[in-house]
Amino acid sequence: MRVLVVGAGTMGHGIASVCAASGYEVDLVDVSEDVLDSARMKIGWSLKKLEERGAIKSAAEALQRIKTSTNLEECAKTADFVIEAVVEKTEVKKEIFRKLDDNCRPEVILSTNTSTIPISDIASATKRPEKVVGLHFFNPPVLIRFVEIVRGSKTSDEALLKTVEFAKSIGMDYIVVEKEVPGFVVNRINVRVFNEAVRLIEAGYRPEEIDAVVRYRIGMPMGLLEVVDFSGVDVLYNVIRELANRGMDVEVPETVKRMIEENRLGMKTGRGFYEYEGFYSRAKILPRFAYRLNPLSLIAVGINEASWLLRNGVATRESIDKAMVLGMGYPKGILEIADDFGLDNVLKALEGREADPLLKQMVSEGKLGKKSGEGFYKWIYEKKEFGPVIYEKRDKYAVITMNRPEKLNALNEEMWKGLNRAFIEAENDPEVRVVVLTGKGRAFCAGDDIAVMGSWKTFLDGKDFFTGVAVPLLNTIANYKKPLISLVNGIAFGGGLELNLAFDIVIASDDALFAVPEGLIGAIPPIASSLGLAVLGRKMMRYCLTGDQMDAEEAKQIGIVDIVVPKDQLEVTGVEFVNKILRLAPLSAKAIKETARIYRDVFGFVVEKGLHEIIELIPTEDFAEGMKAFVQRRRPSWSGR
Ligand code: NAI
């Protein structure tokens, strides 16, 4: 079978390589021998790479299957399938399709690699519009094994199916784009996200901060602006302009226009969004730049566009997601990302911009994504209450919420017991692989309920409470076999801080406050002064001995907190870390927790010592006075003594 590829530029030569590598005889046509010579060289090079990787047997044989020519009419006569990849100019393409139509056998399918021109526009130049199909590759086709197959308004089912078969035969995965909207699926979403990135730069974010979010939080192999610098700011500029000309409501941002005027075209001119010294230099994008910007601030507009595509029947949700994964290197589909982060949060991130009606409707119906069991997709979801503790299973993870907001989620007996039952529930469910703890309202947890502690009169009251109520939860957490994430959404005092010492990853909102003020009321922070000291070192002592508060950044410096994010990012960051852990092999995650047994042994040993000390304090005068003074909101009698 002979494939005719028209146009031997960036895309045409790559497409010809892919076809030849798959065993087809290829005619590659362009306007001049010079262009064809240069294409042959590039093809030789990329086939060699394929051979080195073991993807093809012989580069030389594949190269021999490609014939180059400047005679379109002649080659058209023997073609069995045509792929056009000439310049993005409607008139040039139409002229070529006229010639193809005149010379190709009537049953031959004529496909076009256009990025922006409506298929039916090109098809109108032929007498076989039902056999004209969009076959949109990504650059470079040899590496990105994915195409968008686009149905023009007159394309027949048969032609579409044959094109699908052809795409498969050259090793390409594909989606079908049912309507020829400008930009199809991938470019439409891309252009939105890119324009948003530029808007964020105009609002004061640095390119490194944006790309750090893309690389280290969204999980793409390269930063968005890095990619644009690599492929050329002018290339993207042209795509946006073309899409705007064809009726998509986008504009080229002023910053991009200025970059074009100043010849800041990316790597090829040494300057784009970044500065480059030599061809091999790379932008410095460090992970620590990633936590100022909310990932949703960047991709909410892409999700909004995906919602538009879905609502307008351009592609199915599965196709949209597959396109972004295979065409753009997203770690998962953009609609699944939306379901992960919560559609309510997506809507919030769109901030006064026109949100797609489908998105708004889903939020108003409570379809928020994984956290409600349904968003763009349906998810496994279960909700249970254990006293003041809410337990939710969301797909592959569980969220446990302390729900006594009016008491700042203080740890009374029901809270301790409810937490223990919720953690056990999550531990026993084989589908749950990560567990998240957080607090409802403005506090994470204000610590032990003083009303309970103040009621203890004897040594035994406290001992019974600790051994019967607190220790079971501490044991559960200390021996937990699944990764634990804590989302500290507000104050974490006393026991509220101490729980975090036993968690694997602690993420705090920037307004969270931490303290262990028990000494001020005649008690002690038994876990902070034992386990805290053992795992964080001497630094914890200052806080145990003074009751001083620390903000989230200070808590991070000490080592209680791992990540501090603006409050509106806390939930999203929690989801992000759940997903990061879910990327690990389940057995690896399990084994890592298992090797943490050393830590658990320390936990058991030191906490026992801490509990022993606090129980000893209960029958003392200081303890009784401290509790009373706290309830009466006055200084205890020893204060200032
Ligand atoms: P290019 O400018 O690198 O190559 C176009 C080639 O077409 C040139 O070699 C030119 O000599 C040739 N040509 C012009 N008029 C011709 C004619 N009458 N007959 C035969 N050959 C002719 O452009 P590129 O980037 O390869 O783009 C080609 C098509 O692929 C465009 O429709 C573009 O929108 C589309 N596309 C481009 C992508 C990219 O990343 N560059 C990605 C996906 C699609």
Image: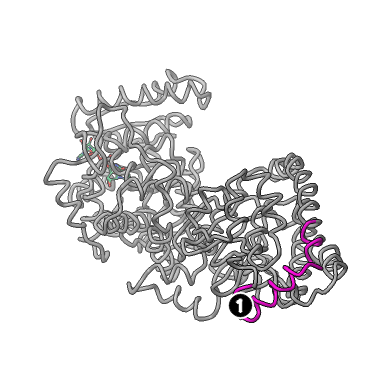
Quarter of the image where one finds residue 636: bottom right
Q: How many C-alpha atoms fall within 10 Å of the one at disc 1: few (<14), some, or many (≥20)?
A: some
Look at 24% across and 44% down and name the residue there: 233
Within the displayed image, which quadrant is ligand 1 positioned in?
Answer: top left
What scheme was used to colour the molecule? one colour
Residue 179 can be seen in this image: yes
Secondary structure beneath dot 1 equals helix
**Residue 321 placed where, x, y %?**
49, 56
Residue 56 in percent (x, y) is at: 50, 25
**Residue 614 included in the magenta stretch of the image:** yes
Residue underneath mark 1: 405
Vertical position of residue 215 compared to residue 62: above or below: below
Locate residue 381 relative to residue 17 in the image: left or right.
Answer: right
Quick one: 635 or 469, which is closer to the camera? 635
Q: Amino acid at mark 1?
A: Pro
Classify residue 13 by image quadrant: top left
Number of numbered discs visible in the structure rendering: 1
Secondary structure mostly seen in magenta is helix
Residue 81: percent from left, percent from top: 39, 41
Residue 110 in view (yes/no):
no
Where 450 sits versus 15, above or below?
A: below
Say which quadrant the N terminus sits in. top left
Where is the C terminus found, in terms of image quarters?
bottom right
Q: Toward the viewer: 196 or 50?
A: 196
The answer to whether residue 384 is above or below residue 614 is below
Q: Position of residue 343 (x, y in %)?
A: 49, 69
* Residue nearer the viewer, 431 or 425: 425
Q: Is residue 528 left or right of residue 91?
A: right
Magenta range is 613-636
Q: Residue at x 17, y 47 (%)?
A: 259
Q: Which residue is depicted at the point 31% across and 29% down?
A: 281
- Picture quadrant of residue 263: top left
